[in-house]
Image (spheres, rainbow, N blue to C red):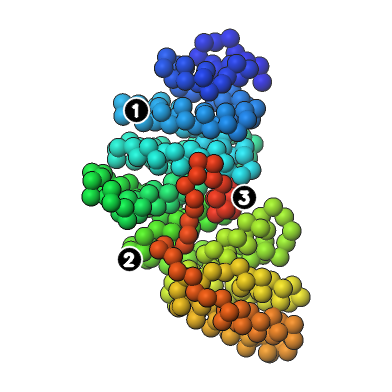
Amino acid sequence: MKSSSSAAVVNASSFSPKRFEDLLHRDVLRFSTQKNRVHFIDTFKNLNQQDRFDLCNKALDACGDLHISHMRLEGLLYPLASSFILESDGASALYFLNQLVKLRPENSMMKEIVTTLLDMNYEHDRSLSKNWKTNHVSLVLVAELGVLWNQDKQNLNMSKMSHNFRNMDSMDDVSEHISSNLISRSNINSSAVRLALVHYLICSPPVTVEKWSLNRTISRFGQSLLDELFQYCFEKNNKSKAAFSFLTAHFLALLTNDTQVFEICFSALKRCLLKHPEQFPKFIQKFTDQMEFHEQSQSFIYKECLENLLKIALQFNNKNILKALEKSMKLIKENPVQKYDNVIPLRNNDNNQKTWHFQCLWNFL
């Protein structure tokens, strides 16, 4: 795309994090036009990873300004969020979110950032990308931001800093803002968005509202979502590993949530057994081996699930499946319960982390 000579248009050939900072100080970079946004995204493609991180830092500096206007905030976040989708691993997106949480912006500013990101989901500027799924990236970003925000809040509560930190109540307010907005958008037909929502709810503090929301969410679309994930596990494509990782991390949390969710999870495994009888023995052993049992109840309920599958396999007298299920139940006995302070060990706090769960979600965009 040719560069414009207009002063208001960013010249992609000369664009850099330093140039970005200069434009911020001069209040020129608003990206209110399609041409400016396209220039930004085209430039992002050609930056190396460190320059992309530097670009995120410059944008974060501007986001920390309490006096930033909604138009300028949207002008910063819109092209940035649209550019993140260009990366296969979501490294820049995750870096941006981690640094944003570390900044701990004021309550009103953080809620404004969340609202701006969520509003982007309803933009349909197809010129930014030929992939319409870009419209869902903002919801995945907000869900992951919520996970990171809750983890930071939990870390503060567990540390000696919590009683000195004046914004604990406002952090709760931000969490509630994220939760209510994500749950209200749970009817969006996107695997990435639904997976992000499930991941967020599972990783949220174990309060009644989140548990009820998780039950309701799984009851609404859990069957189709689990069927899709398990199906990917029996295929060879770029989503297979992501689906398997997501399931091994979260299946136990879902299985032990309540009776109705247990039935949905069990039915999904049952359909796998019936649909892929030749591949199922190898799958169920690997699936069981990769699980980490954090509570005794998880191993007990998962064993119950396998026993129910065993009854179904007996009807068909499939010796390979029977043998695999028996070995899987033996694996549960040999796999000790692993104790963690959190239900799920979420992540490292390294600036360059590319956590597995976020990469899983990113693969579905």
Q: Is residue 184 visible?
A: no
Residue hosting label 2: 208
Residue extending farthest front: 160
Residue hosting label 1: 65
Residue hosting label 3: 363
Q: Nearer the viewer, residue 160 or 306?
A: 160
Front position among marks 1 and 3: 1
> What amino acid type should be assigned to the residue bearing mark 3?
Asn
N-terminal-most mark, 2 or 3: 2
> What amino acid type should be assigned to the residue bearing mark 2?
Thr
Place of residue 304 in the rendered image (x, y in percent of width and height, measured from the top left)? 53, 83
Place of residue 47 in the rendered image (x, y in percent of width and height, measured from the top left)? 62, 28
* Badge 2 element: helix
Position of 69 compared to 32: left or right? left
Using the numbered discs, state the Cα–Cα distance from disc 2 to disc 3 in whole angstroms: 31 Å
Residue extending farthest right: 278
> What amino acid type should be assigned to the residue bearing mark 1?
Asp
* Badge 3 element: loop
Residue 334 higher or lower than 114, as above or below: below
Position of 135 compared to 107: left or right? right
What is the tally of numbered marks visible in this picture? 3
